[in-house]
């Protein structure tokens, strides 16, 4: 064998050995397989959500037959409904809904029914008197009251010389009547019930710039409490007068009511917009 042939054989043996060594080394290591991509859910199929739970109740339900909650300034009975449980200051006895006059009666102390017209519409109690010296009275048929606060909102639609009255403690023995005019004057009258009640004595008269004159809306409050009568005009106290004075017999309780009267200036057109009875 020649020298060159021997060298070629040795080189071939070396290459074969190296190839076997590399294959052995690679076989000792497990290759990490490439993870297959996760399939996303189809976008056109909505995923159902759990149902929404109802909110917890804010108050325990009232047992059937339980008496109604006591009415206050923040919680009053529905319009046109008398609250028999009103007893604390601010509790509302009654608020007129201005939908009908089922809780009221009326009569004339003076005048002819043909000259008066009244009706309720558009949440107002509309009143018209077209004749002179006509006295129209309304009585609330919800019982008698001793201490009572009456709030009346009234709109003048015609003449300033309109006597709008708030009545308390009405009975066969007489009543107290507060009359307020859009001229700026006001009066407190007393009736002893004689001669059908159409003889009124003046207990007090005054004038106030608090009264909005002309065709305006005014808010009047009369409080008959114990032996005093207090008048508020548009939220401000105008006067407090004693009821045990002079020759006037004290009247302890009775119905409440309203009145509208004319003298020589006509027509008188007024609308009652709100009427509330409450505990003073």
Image: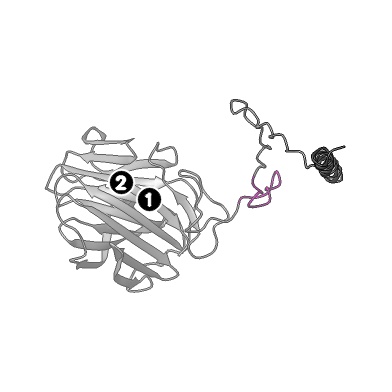
One can see residue 171 in this view: no
Disc 2 on helix, strand or loop? strand
Q: Which mark is residue 178?
A: none
Task: Check if mark 2's residue and mark 1's residue have beta carbons within 8 Å.
Answer: yes
- Which residue in the structure is indicated by mark 1? 275
Crowding at dot 1, Cα within 10 Å, few <14 / some 14-19 / many 20+, comes out as many
The overriding secondary structure of the stretch rendered in magenta is loop
- Which residue in the structure is indicated by mark 2? 272
Report if residue 59 lies within the magenta region.
Answer: yes
Report if residue 276 lies within the magenta region.
Answer: no
The image shows residue 123 at horizontal and vertical percentages of 34, 40
Q: Residue at x 42, y 71 (%)?
A: 227
Residue 42 vertical placement versus 3 (above, below): above
Disc 1 on helix, strand or loop? strand
Task: Looking at the picture, tell me which residue is in the foreground, 124 or 270.
Answer: 124
Name, please, the residue furthest toward the front.
2
User: In this rendering, would 33 be left or right of 39?
Assistant: right
Q: Residue at x 12, y 48 (%)?
A: 264
Residue 132 vertical placement versus 45 (above, below): below
User: In this rendering, would 179 be left or right of 169?
Assistant: left
Task: Looking at the picture, tell me which residue is in the foreground, 16 or 269.
Answer: 16
The magenta segment: 55-68
User: In this rendering, would 224 be left or right of 157?
Assistant: right
The image shows residue 140 at horizontal and vertical percentages of 42, 47
Residue 63 vertical placement versus 211 (above, below): above
Crowding at dot 2, Cα within 10 Å, few <14 / some 14-19 / many 20+, comes out as many
User: In this rendering, would 250 be left or right of 241?
Assistant: right
Separation of marks 2 and 1 at Cα, in angstroms: 7 Å
One can see residue 127 in this view: yes
Name, please, the residue furthest toward the top.
44
Q: Residue at x 49, y 54 (%)?
A: 93
């Amino acid at each position: 064998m020649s020298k060159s042939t021997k060298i070629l054989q040795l080189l071939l043996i070396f290459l074969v050995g190296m190839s076997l060594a590399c294959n052995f080394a690679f076989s000792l290591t497990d290759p990490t397989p490439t993870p297959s991509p996760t399939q996303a859910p189809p976008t056109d199929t909505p995923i159902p959500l759990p149902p929404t739970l109802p909110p917890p109740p804010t108050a325990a339900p009232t047992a059937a037959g339980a008496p109604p909650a006591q009415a206050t300034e923040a919680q009053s009975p529905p319009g046109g409904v008398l609250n028999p449980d009103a007893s604390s200051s601010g509790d509302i006895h009654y608020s007129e809904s201005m939908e009908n006059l089922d809780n009221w009666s009326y009569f004339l102390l003076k005048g002819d029914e043909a000259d008066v017209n009244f009706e309720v519409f558009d949440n107002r109690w509309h009143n018209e008197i077209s004749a002179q010296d006509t006295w129209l009275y309304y009585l609330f048929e919800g019982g008698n009251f001793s201490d009572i606060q009456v709030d009346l909102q009234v709109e003048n639609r015609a003449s300033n010389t309109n006597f709008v009255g708030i009545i308390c403690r009405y009975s066969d023995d007489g009543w107290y009547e507060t009359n307020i005019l859009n001229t700026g004057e006001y009066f407190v009258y007393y009736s002893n019930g004689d001669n059908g009640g159409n003889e009124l004595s003046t207990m007090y008269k005054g004038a106030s710039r608090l009264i909005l004159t002309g065709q305006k809306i005014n808010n009047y409050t009369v409080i008959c409490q114990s032996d005093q009568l207090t008048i508020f005009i548009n939220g401000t106290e105008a006067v407090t007068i004693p009821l045990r004075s002079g020759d006037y017999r004290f009247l302890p309780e009775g119905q409440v009511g309203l009145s509208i009267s004319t003298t020589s200036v006509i027509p008188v057109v007024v609308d009652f917009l709100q009427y509330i009875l409450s505990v003073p």
